[in-house]
Structure formats: structure tokens, C-alpha cells
Image (cartoon, grey):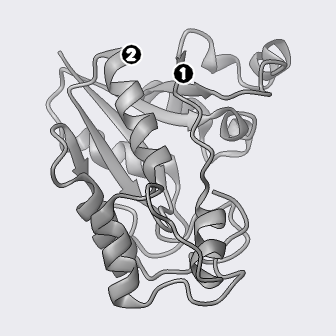
Amino acid sequence: MMNIGILGGTFDPIHIGHLGIAAAATTQVGLDKILFIPAGHPRFKRAKPSASVVHRLKMVHLATNDIQGFEVCDIETSRPGPSYSVDTLVEIKANLPEKVNLFFIVGMDVLNQLHRWKDPERVLSLCQLLVLNRSGEQNFNWDEFYQRVPAAKRRIRNISSPIINVSATELRNKLATGKSISGLVPDVVAKYIFDQKLYLTIGEGRTTN
């Protein structure tokens, strides 16, 4: 039985925090590989990503090329309209052998919005959720959550990751003000950002990671 993890996001830009989460999930759950899936236009984000789909895909490819078990999937960026996780999972599942377990990696903040997703029960039938524990989120109300989404019982597993204080918003602001991002993104990604002159205006893009 193969175990495949899914890590979605706008990756605007991808940074060491994303890679750390993927590595932690791989080790703790025994994943055979992780699919990085850049979003086109996520449903719950107020603003469009700052960098284009082409640039964001290229940066994810550059960041993951040399890491065994990390792969990039453009399923959402090639789909018109808002990205729905259930549609992505259905399409991925249809193109995989039957004996595959899918694990969708999410943060606790995303988990708290699960009841607002398109067809959350179907999502949970297609995959297990790997929920990233972050500091300050230990007071999550699990009883209330399971009342809202009963199908989530026995479909959730907690994982932990080293605390890495970096966000895409922070990186964009640093770049716009001429500050160094050394060590916060892979070197090849930093070079690409500078070569392509990305993120030159402060406040570009969305307001969260």
C-alpha cells in the first residue's frame, strides 16, 4: 500500500516552512511521496496571488527538484475557476492505483473551516487529514469540531513540525523593501525571484500564508 501526501497552497513564494512541513509529514507518517499542488485561485482567499501561475509553479519545481519523494502537480493551476479540494482529490484518486492512501496536509486554522468546504464528507472519504500542530493552537475545540463534521472522526491524524518563523507575506514585504530573504527560501528560488524581479511592491498578493 502506497501512502501519498498532498500539500496545497498558493506558494507565493514557496519557502522553507513549506518544505519543513512536508519533510515532517513524510517522516512521521511514512509517506512514499508528497504532491505539492499550487492553487490557481483559492476559494477562501480575498486577493489573487501576487506572482503568476507560471512563476509560482516554476518556484515550486525549483524548490523540490532535488528532494526525493517530492513532486509537483499542476492539477489546480490548470483548472479554471476556484479550486475545490474535493475535485482535486477525485481527479487524483482516479489516476492512481486502487491500493493508495491519500493524506491531505492542513493547518489547524484550515481544519476549523472544514465544514465550509465543498462536500467535506466526500473529502474525508477520499483521504485522511494530517493536521499540523502549531504553538498557540492547543486549545482547539475538538468536541465542537466533531459536532460540526462527524465524518472527521478517525480520519484525522496530528503531526508536528519544527517552528519556522517565516510566512509568504513576510517574504513579499522583505523583498519589496530590499531586505534579505537568505535562508528563508531555497537559494534557487531566491535567485529566480531576483532574476524575474518578483514582489517589488509592498502589500502585493494575499494577506496570509
In the picture of the structure, the residue carrying the numbered disc 2 is: 28
Mark seen at residue 160 = 1
Q: Earlier in the sequence, mark 2 or mark 1?
A: 2
| Viewer-closest of 134 and 84 | 134
178 lies above or below 93: below
Q: Amino acid at mark 1?
A: Ser
Task: Name the amino acid type tagged 2.
Answer: Gln
Q: Residue at x 44, y 82 (%)?
A: 52
For the point 28% across and 72% down, which residue is it?
Answer: 58
Q: Is residue 87 left or right of residue 110?
A: left
The kind of secondary structure element at disc 2 is: helix
**Residue 43, image x, y percentages:** 63, 62
Apparent side of residue 58 relative to residue 46 in the rendered image (left or right): left
Q: Is residue 95 left or right of residue 115?
A: left
Residue count near mark 2 (Cα–Cα under 10 Å), binned few <14, some 14–19, many ≥20: few
Residue 108 percent location from the top left of the image = 68, 32
